[in-house]
Image: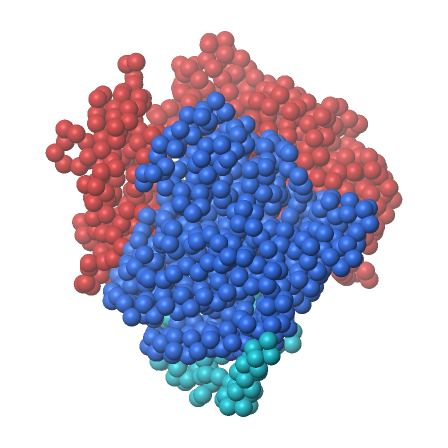
Amino acid sequence: MPDEVTLTIDGKQITVPKGTLVIEAAKKLGIDIPVFCYHTKLEPVGACRQCLVKIEGFPKPQVSCSTQVAEGMVVHVNTPEVKQMWESMLEFLLINHPLDCPVCDRGGECPLQDNTFKYGPPDSRFEHEKRHFEKPVPLSSLVLLDRERCILCFRCVRFQREIADQPDIYVANRGYGDYIDIFPGKPFESNFSGNTIELCPVGALLSSLFRFRARPWEITKTESICPNCGVGCNITIDDRRRRYVVRFLARINDEVNEHWLCDRGRFNSHTINDPDRLVKPLVRKNGELQEATWEEALTVALEGMRAAGSHAGGIGSPARTNEANYLFQKFMRQVIGTNNVDYTFEKRTDGSTGALASAIASVFFNGRISDIAESDAILCLGSDISYDLPLLDLWIKKAVRKLGKNLVFAYPLKAELAKYARPFLSYHYGQEAEFTRELASAVSGTSWQPLAGVRMEDIDLASEVLKSANYVTVMVAKSMIESAENGRDVLKSLQWIADSLKSRNVRVQVMLLVQGANTFGAMDVGLLPGYLPGYKPADKGLTGWEMLEKAGSDISALWIMGQNPARDLFHTEAFTAALQKLDMLVVQDHILTETARYAHVVLPSSTFAETEGTFTNTERRIQRINPAIRRVGNSKADTDIIIEAASLAGADFNYSKVEEILTEISNTVPQYQGVTFDAIGPFGRYLGDLK
Amino acid sequence: MANTLVTKDLIPQTIQDIAQKAQTLEGKEIHLRAEKEAILHLCQALRNDSGLNYNFLSDITAVDYYTAESRFELVYRMYSIPEGRRLWIKVPVGIDQEVDTVTSVWKNADWMEREVFDMFGIRFSGHPDLRRILMPANWIGHPLRKDHPIGSEEVQFTVNTGDITSQIEFLNSRFEGMDFFGYVERGSELNTLYGAEKMKKYEEEGKIILNMGPQHPSTHGVLRVILALEGETIVDADLDIGYLHTGIEKQAEQLIYQQALTLTDRMDYVSPLMNNLGYSMSVEKILGVEVPPRGQYLRVLLAELTRIGSHLVWLGTHALEIGAVTVFLYCFQDRELLLDIFELLSGQRMMTSWINIGGLRDDIPEGFTHAVKNFLEVFPPRLKEYHTLLTNNPIWLKRTKGIGYLSLEDALDYGVSGPILRAAGMEFDVRKTWPYSAYSDFEFDIPTGENSDVYDRYLVRMEEMRQSLRIAEQALAKLPEGDYRIEDYKIVLPPRQRLDVSMESLIHHFLVATQGFLPPKGDAYVSYEGPRGETGYYIVSDGSGKPYRMHMRSPSFSALQSMPLMVRGHYVSDVISVLGSVDMIMGEVDR
Amino acid sequence: MIGELIKGLGVTIKHALTSKRVTIEYPEQKRTLGPRARWRHVLLRHEDGLERCIGCSLCAGACPARCILVEAAENREGARYSPGERYAKVYEINMLRCIFCGYCQDACPVEAIILRPIYEISEYTRDAEIYTKDMLLMPYPNPQTEDLGNTNA
């Protein structure tokens, strides 16, 4: 085959695609070669020289990480000569390495230690003074640098430059005097800085949050999903003694987050064991919130909610699991007897929900994150992705910078991704419908007028870029649809764009950009007024925003799970006033939020790190979370709280395991057909694939 | 031959191959893999039909290779005594598959297969009495399977003291179907009074069923003997073991090799250093390292002192149970000297954990040689005193002569080794047949008996003590200079002074202390002559720092199984004498 | 027959009348343990009073019984406990779980933890057998290490 190469490594033949690196070919044969600077996601540099091998025909040893395979190449790895080279290279690296292992956080999970143990010398020949630096040096409030330990593999600098495109760190000085530094007065602010800590093969770059907190043999690991944004990055929760979460690490999933996490998600681990965690239910007695038993608290809550009946409301959360949201709406509708259920208290325009619901149900949104890199053109509408869904920012940067793809970026403000866009369409905020109609007209070849603040040339350029592509990814922010005066129109225009492109034989995938880790899931399982699970029509109900608007009149009782309207950016006063008008306010959350301070009953719920369940991310991939630590204090999982409340009310919510709830969801929601814990697996599955 | 599975048709060919090799070096240790359908015929051929005379079944155990195509692998190990040829057969068995029992070939297999069934769930078709042996009768699950949870109480610190209800919840939740609180209350109704089915039949026939133990001052540990009596005479006996089962083998899979060494002290707890030795030798075989001569000699010295210590316990408790209380006190007084020597050497009297992988943990301290020399002078006269007190004492003779006869044929059939086999007349000692650890440098004799009764076993052990003194003297006199351990820092900890100056040594110290050394994949078993017979540790390594499987071949396990034969026709009080002569340690029987 | 019994009695009577008593009348008399005796743990200090323990947790990693709990923290200005960056903020040993194998002593890279021949460590409650750092840390100024727990001292 013309694009394949056959070579021999240690006497074994293998055929690999052209362009494969020798080290990768060896890995396929199960031959392990030690590395430091080499990383599968970074361009090879051959800086550390650890991966030397003998290749016949070359007088000197070659670095296998930077050498591509050639037809008929004969490589020798497991020979005494090569082993001696590896040992010597490690000896060189260890000459200036400080004797820090007992105090270094990397000890026990350190590639330098492991490679020295496997391939390095057992004792030292070095008897002189090692080089010294001041240590550790804070590069930011999150990342510390110990220059004495740095082996100058440059992975950190390369990552920031090649992948994050936020080169906040650089290599100062030169040659023997190299060291890593930040620019004067500019700390290491990149919101991907945490990844350099995981990349660093020694204990040079360290997390200040994790500093000295645990040793690898004291840690238990659990697979989970980050709950902070719609990407749903795969994480590993590290904890001590099944009680204290000590950090989050990235879990490799080449279809979602590859090897990376953003700082916001990564450095949030300390909130789980925060001393402010609610540990007991609270009930308001004599004007003050006092500790109570679960039975007491739930009884009071039920009384208040049932008294309100159809004048009660329930607001769930796009950051809680499918199982929790599903039971929540079922509880509100069947046990409390109200149609007022929603997953958010944010204002949405009339009709946008309905339009979105039918779009989701008709599988209009079929976009996959990993296909972003496959497409020739990416159309991103209405989202500051770098802030809202940071990992997607990395995917787009990969497509544009590494693979030469085109980005059309539309946003009212100049966001970070604007500089990669060709063109950047800066439409007027509030004129989303007009703008998308213009764009759709241009793409379809219909005449149009520039109304929304974007120049004609830019729209023309955008339409050309899209039309001349083979595969286009359209990403549209849900907030753009919901805040537009007529969200329905925005969706119609999108449909028009997709249809026009498809009629020109351009492949199109459309992704709805949601901000919550489980926004899709919350909608899918029926936490929407007027929709039952699976977007089946239900009796009309009030939205979260309307519930708060009508608090004290149409709404006399609210049960809020995982939301904090009293802290809303724009409506604090109005919401706070509204909450105080309620006869019964039940708040189910982790800490005593601002909203909870006005509650009559506060129910402590366990976090995602303590419970089982599923999240559906922005590409409609369903992923599993697993409990890492035992429940903090006397908190309960959201599902358990609702099950207990239901049984106190005499209803039959008979689920002994969380998976049973998922089974019910898979039987009730058509989009979730075929979903089981096993089918989801450790890396999640697209909902579409499971049917 | 090692990799092709022996099927029924290949048996004749295999036997021929083995017979051809029998006299060569290669024939000394042969490894086979066989199909489970072929195992019974193969074993029959190896023992009975072919003249190869593999008459001694050392061990049947299993390993759970969880992700392998055939989940389990049964490991059979047999010897031809006294020539000393060894043969292994490995049989892959899938889950829910049955294997023919080999109890018809060696009676020994009875308990061993029961243990494999108990721990792994592999059923043996045709087995006379397939029920649990170590675990309680109502246990759900098979503990040594890799997916069976290991329960334990959380270690208490100030952050979690008193958190006991959550511990019980935790245990109950891990072991589905078990109710740990309830089990404790219900336990008594579930205890099987009769043991084997045959006991029930005896009762129907009108015999008296008498229960001895597990709480009994003279059953030599927590052992329960169920006797069927005709009047005062014993018709038959059954043994109920497992009261001291603490899951050591499963626990070893959770610890790194050096840490698992501390568990071995506690198996045969009266001879801890020998356990350390056996375990270390097996691991060293996997690692492919050889201990330097000084280390070897010190190991021999310590092993022999341990043997004397163990025999002193045997003698003291045996005599005590028969009524000679003074002997007990004298023996323990002499044992104090030994325990003081061990304390001088290691810091602990009993659980020393001093013989380590690679040699010893440290060299002998000052005063050690003096203390040992002192013991070697003080002890021989004391030994003579024991003889004076017991050997021709009429009461002793009445209680031990002619009691507990075990024919040589039965002894081999039941896999009995050590002093009991030697008292039956067979001169077999691992130190002579398969010398390990420099024993071939030493001169010593193997005492044997003729009558195979309790008295002969007594004489054999007394003489063994004398021979051990001989070896100890030689070891001390010829002790070579040099290293007491291998100096490979990828296996042993580097010397302290290197940690301040050598980066590489610090790294190796860090990893060897916490993650442990990484042996190559493989398995090994090295026998040694423990005070109770042929002992050894079968270790399987998967390349990680923790043993994948650790199994101890316990000589008392087999010896105890033959005990009913020794008591038939005797009185109840003779059970005590017989148990004393068997000299089992429940720690190694039950693990 | 009688002859044998008399010979036996001869041995025991000889011992009863002439042998030195070997019983050590504890607690009035106490046996001296060997210098390597492994009993109670002690956390040592440097000459200048700084703790030797740097909170590296290798002892906890080497312990077969998992009975050591270490939580490390950073030395700060005005709150320096050990030389270097790191010290043990929490250091506990559950003495009931400890098997006195001495692996912690072997694993410690800075000779901070040692096992001394102090064997009188019985208590009436389980909680009292959880030794915290203040109970383990040797007092300052340091007595000579060899004197720690020496029953003859």
**Above or below A498: residue B503:** below
State the image quarter where residue B470 is shown.
Answer: bottom left
Q: Is residue C79 visible?
A: no
Q: Colour of chain A?
A: red
Name the outermost residue toward the left.
A59
**Where's residue B333, x and y in %?**
51, 78
**Above or below B556: residue B371:** below
Q: Colour of chain C?
A: cyan
**Where's residue B74, x and y in %?**
52, 38
Left or right of A61? Residue B409 is right
Question: What's the image's color scheme?
Answer: by chain
Along the viewing direction, whichever of B349 and C90 lies nearer the viewer:
B349
Q: Is residue B439 visible?
A: yes
Residue, x 41% and y 50% (percent of image)? B526
Along the viewing direction, whichever of A253 and C132 lies nearer the viewer:
C132
Pick the quarter of the image with the C terminus of chain A: top right
Residue, x 32% and y 35% (percent of image)? A31
**Where's residue A105, x and y in %?**
40, 56
**Where's residue A246, x and y in %?**
51, 54
Residue, x 40% and y 66% (percent of image)? B467
Along the viewing direction, whichever of A633 and C11 lies nearer the viewer:
C11
- The blue one among the chains is B
Residue, x 45% and y 26% (percent of image)? B12
State the image quarter where residue A44 is shown.
Answer: top left
Tally of numbered tags: 0
Left or right of A636? Residue B77 is left
Left or right of B90? Residue A588 is right
Pick the quarter of the image with the N terminus of chain A: top left
